[in-house]
Image: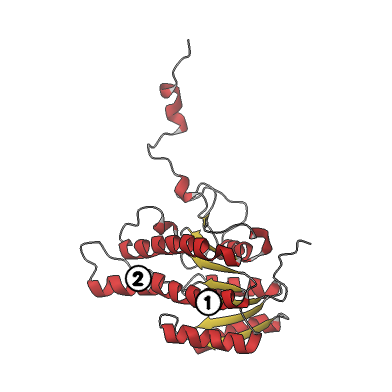
Amino acid sequence: MIDLGLEGKRAVVAGAGYNPVRAGHGRWSAQLLGAAGASVACVDIDEGRAKAIAAEITEAGGQALPIVADVREPDEVVRAFDLVTAEFGGVDVCVDIVGLATWDGLLDITPQAWDAQLRENLTQVFYVWQEAARRMVGQGSGGSLVALASIDGMVAAAFHGAYGAAKAGVISLAKTFAHEFGRYGIRANVVAPGNVGGGNMDQPPGEYAVNGINPLAAPRTVDIANSVLFLCSDLAARTTGQVLVVDGGATTAELWGVTEEMLPGLRVALP
């Protein structure tokens, strides 16, 4: 069995609760961290969701702490980490799953909607990571910071302009955290999912290239959570400032529409 190095570690998952209309990245990530032996602080804005995921981890034999907090507010972030420190004694792993996309054309998005998207998808990551890094530096034992970005932060994000800009900011933020805090043994990385939507766990196994978008297959919630777990673990001990893309190959798409049928007419005879 591979040792992930997470046994006895103290983890915070912001956005750990499960919303049935969402993919459940926080829930799956929190469960995997608990199964790997970490004590998990399950932070969510909704009390019922926080308690539910903490109960799932506990019932599976792990240790979990539900915390109700709005991580868009810096004072709430500090309070949440104070509770984690009081219960667990510190923090070694911090995962930020919080995010929400809205749809608008660039000519239609209002200043209020723009600001809200940056606050929801970027600013709160800074608050959470800043407080986690502050605690980790004080502990002197290193740590791992992980957040969800999106492939919308790496390529064009039509009608997702504010969301894409925010996720690009998360990627930049990870690189800067990695650079500034590497000397303390603190790593910072992001997972960039493709279109998981409301969750694709019902995909039949062994079916590939079925939708014209993903040359492999659309990513599932568990694929994202597995990637989060990897970046939190000792398997990624020398990985920092990186973006782990989990998109089923969607962003590998070529630009010119060349098909196999076109090849005979494109080939040039060699002399």
Q: Residue furthest top?
A: 271
Residue at the left extreme of this rendering: 107
Going 48% across and 10% down the picture, which residue do you hit? Answer: 271
Q: Give the secondary structure at mark 2.
A: helix
Residue occupying the point 59% across, 85% down: 84
Q: Is residue 247 above or below residue 8?
A: above
x and y percent of residue 212 in the render? 45, 47
Marker disc for residue 80:
none
Observer-side mark, 1 or 2, equals 1
Q: SS class of the residue under badge 1?
A: helix
Q: Which residue, given by chain and number where applicable, does mark 1 sit on?
A: 134
Q: Is residue 156 visible?
A: yes
Residues packed near mark 1 inside 10 Å, few (<14), some (14 to 19) or many (20 plus): few
Looking at the image, residue 135 lies above or below residue 179: below
Q: Across the whole image, how many numbered discs are drawn on residues?
A: 2
**What is the three-letter code of the residue carrying label 1?**
Arg
- Residue 159 is situated, as x and y percent measured from the top left of the image, at 30, 61
Q: Nearer the viewer, residue 47 or 80?
A: 80
Q: CA distance from mark 1 to mark 2?
A: 23 Å
Residue 51 in view here: no
Residue visible at 57% across and 64% down in the picture: 183
Displayed quadrant of residue 110: bottom left
Instruction: Specify how the rendered protein is coloured.
Output: secondary structure
Disc 2 residue type?
Answer: Leu
Mark 2 = which residue? Answer: 118
Residue 168 percent across, percent down from the top left? 40, 60
Q: Label 2: few (<14), some or many (≥20) within 10 Å?
A: many
